[in-house]
Image (cartoon, rainbow, N blue to C red):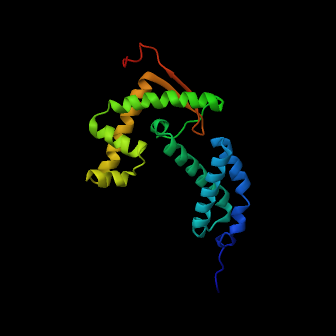
């Protein structure tokens, strides 16, 4: 007797994923708040989706799979364009009960945070400062950092993680920083002098 494949093992067709383009575009647009950028990121999402489509066998999971790719690409965009806040989001943005502030206010908060994080980075020990500057500000991957420094990949990863942890600890000691579930900066303010010894 010849066994038959379950229905969900059938390949997923291109037409089955393209129909999710509008919902994905709305999902992205709600997070980046820039139409041109949202269009570009949506295009990038579906290029990746279509390239990896042969890997998908279970059509029951395709929607979640597409939106997971969308979340990853949006997160990658924010990490590339906003290294200062990416340093503070390394554990993932936590759910917040606060509503997102307006775009202008968010930009002001991010500018303040970016300036402060840069000052913190300048005070790091040389090996950690170099790791942060090359990966977070100059876009070098950790593998490229390892080759650049002539060290193993695990050592490079450890150095970057340690540098991030130092920056985050110093910033959080002196500042209250809060993000919503989508990585939007909703609050950034200095703590009281009693809690902060950075002057």
Describe residue 174's horizontal placement relative to residue 185 as left or right.
Answer: left
Describe residue 39's horizontal placement relative to residue 109 as left or right.
Answer: right
Q: As rendered, which of 196 and 123 lies closer to the eye?
A: 123
**Image point (58%, 61%), residue name:** 48
Q: As rendered, which of 191 and 133 lies closer to the eye?
A: 133
Q: Furthest-bottom residue in view?
A: 1
Q: Position of residue 118 (x, y in %)?
A: 41, 32
Q: As rendered, which of 18 and 91 lies closer to the eye?
A: 18
Q: Position of residue 138 (x, y in %)?
A: 41, 45
Q: Is residue 24 above or below residue 127?
A: below
Q: Point out the image quarter for the N terminus.
A: bottom right
Q: Position of residue 152 (x, y in %)?
A: 28, 54
Q: Furthest-left residue in view?
A: 150
Q: Point out the image quarter for the C terminus.
A: top left
* Residue 33 sits in quarter: top right
Q: Position of residue 157 (x, y in %)?
A: 35, 48
Residue 66 in view here: yes
**Image point (64%, 66%), residue name:** 58
Describe residue 151's horizontal placement relative to residue 107 as left or right.
Answer: left
Q: As rendered, which of 136 and 27 lies closer to the eye?
A: 136
Q: Furthest-top residue in view?
A: 194
**Image point (36%, 17%), residue name:** 197
**Image point (68%, 62%), residue name:** 60
Describe residue 94's horizontal placement relative to residue 62 as left or right.
Answer: left
Disc count in the image? 0
């Amino acid at each position: 007797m010849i066994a038959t494949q379950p229905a969900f093992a059938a390949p997923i067709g291109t037409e089955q994923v393209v129909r999710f383009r509008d919902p994905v575009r709305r999902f992205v647009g709600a997070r980046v708040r820039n139409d041109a950028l949202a269009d570009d990121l949506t295009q990038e999402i579906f290029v990746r989706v279509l390239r990896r489509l042969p890997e998908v066998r279970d059509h029951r999971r395709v929607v979640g799979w597409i939106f997971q790719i969308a979340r990853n690409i949006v997160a990658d965009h924010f990490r590339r364009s906003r290294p200062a806040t990416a340093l503070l989001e390394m554990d993932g943005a936590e759910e917040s009960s606060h509503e997102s502030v307006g775009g202008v206010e968010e930009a002001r908060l991010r500018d303040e945070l970016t300036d402060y994080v840069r000052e913190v980075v300048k005070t790091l020990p040389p090996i950690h400062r170099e790791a942060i500057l090359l990966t977070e500000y100059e876009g070098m991957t950790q593998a490229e950092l390892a080759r650049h420094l002539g060290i193993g990949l695990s050592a490079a990863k450890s150095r970057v993680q340690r540098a991030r942890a130092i920056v985050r600890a110093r910033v959080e000691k002196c500042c209250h920083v809060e993000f919503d579930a989508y990585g939007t900066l909703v609050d950034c303010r200095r703590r009281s002098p009693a809690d902060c010894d950075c002057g």
